[in-house]
Image (cartoon, rainbow, N blue to C red):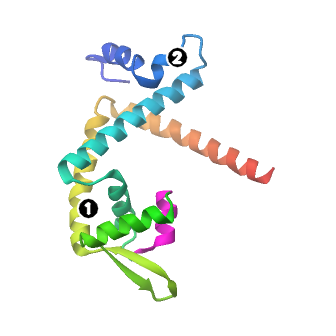
């Protein structure tokens, strides 16, 4: 459960914030849950964006881009990078141009496909990303610090069940 010190006051405040302010007591629990998840996600993302900008002078989009390349040490084709980031090729090209100018990534022609570009983090880019990622992890731990470990595990499990349900729904719609 939520840490008990000020949990009631915090829950009351949370109920009055953002999207949830529109809810009525008779609204479906699923709607209430959706709006609470949306409000929490929005707040966490806004704080991460603010901290990345303040501490590292970088956008969340650039951080996410570098995170994908960090996970793929051998680099990624720009098309794959676009798919992983769920953004257009134009956005990836713009980010690549910026990060290449800052000497954080390299762009090379793919030896297996001369029409494609392969993007990799430079050693400087890897070092900078590692510093940002460690700080990012500390921020996440801080932001979720109001929840105990058991609650975090329960939420993770429950949201995993929801994700499986959504994927199954999506697949059944594709087959219809």
Mark in the foreground, 1 or 2: 2
Q: Which residue is mark 2?
A: 23
Furthest residue in direction top, as rendered: 25
Magenta-span inclusion, residue 20 = no
Tell me which segment is drawn in magenta: 75-86
- Vertical placement of 90 versus 153: above or below? below
Is there CB contact under 8 Å for labels 1 and 2? no
Q: Nearer the viewer, residue 138 or 152?
A: 138
Of residues 69 and 18, the one drawn nearer to the viewer in this rendering = 18
- Which residue does the numbered mark 1 point to in the structure image? 129
Q: Is residue 92 left or right of residue 28?
A: left
What's the residue at 54%, 10% (across, down)? 25
Q: How many neighbours does mark 1 have within 10 angstroms: few (below 14), some (14-19), or many (20 or more)?
A: many
The image quarter containing residue 65 is bottom left
Dot 2: within a 10 Å radius of its alpha carbon, few (fewer than 14), some, or many (20 or more) residues? some
Q: Residue furthest left?
A: 55
Q: Is residue 129 left or right of residue 163?
A: left
Q: Is residue 82 magenta?
A: yes
Could you tell me residue 157's position as x and y percent?
A: 50, 39
- Above or below 53: residue 65: below
């Amino acid at each position: 459960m939520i840490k008990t010190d000020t949990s009631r006051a915090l829950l009351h405040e949370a109920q009055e914030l953002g999207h949830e302010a529109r809810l009525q007591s008779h609204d479906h629990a699923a709607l209430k849950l959706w709006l609470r998840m949306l409000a929490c996600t929005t707040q966490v993302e806004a704080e991460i964006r603010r901290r990345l900008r303040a501490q590292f002078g970088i956008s969340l989009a650039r951080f996410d881009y570098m995170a994908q390349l960090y996970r793929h040490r051998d680099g990624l084709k720009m098309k794959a990078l676009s798919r992983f980031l769920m953004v257009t090729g134009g956005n990836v090209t713009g980010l690549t141009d910026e990060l290449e100018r800052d000497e954080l990534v390299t762009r090379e022609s793919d030896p297996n496909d001369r029409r494609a570009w392969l993007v990799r983090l430079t050693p400087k880019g890897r070092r900078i990303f590692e510093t940002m990622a460690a700080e990012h992890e500390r921020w996440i731990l801080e932001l979720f610090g109001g929840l105990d470990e058991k609650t975090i595990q329960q939420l993770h499990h429950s949201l995993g069940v929801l994700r499986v349900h959504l994927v199954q729904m999506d697949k059944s719609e594709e087959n219809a």
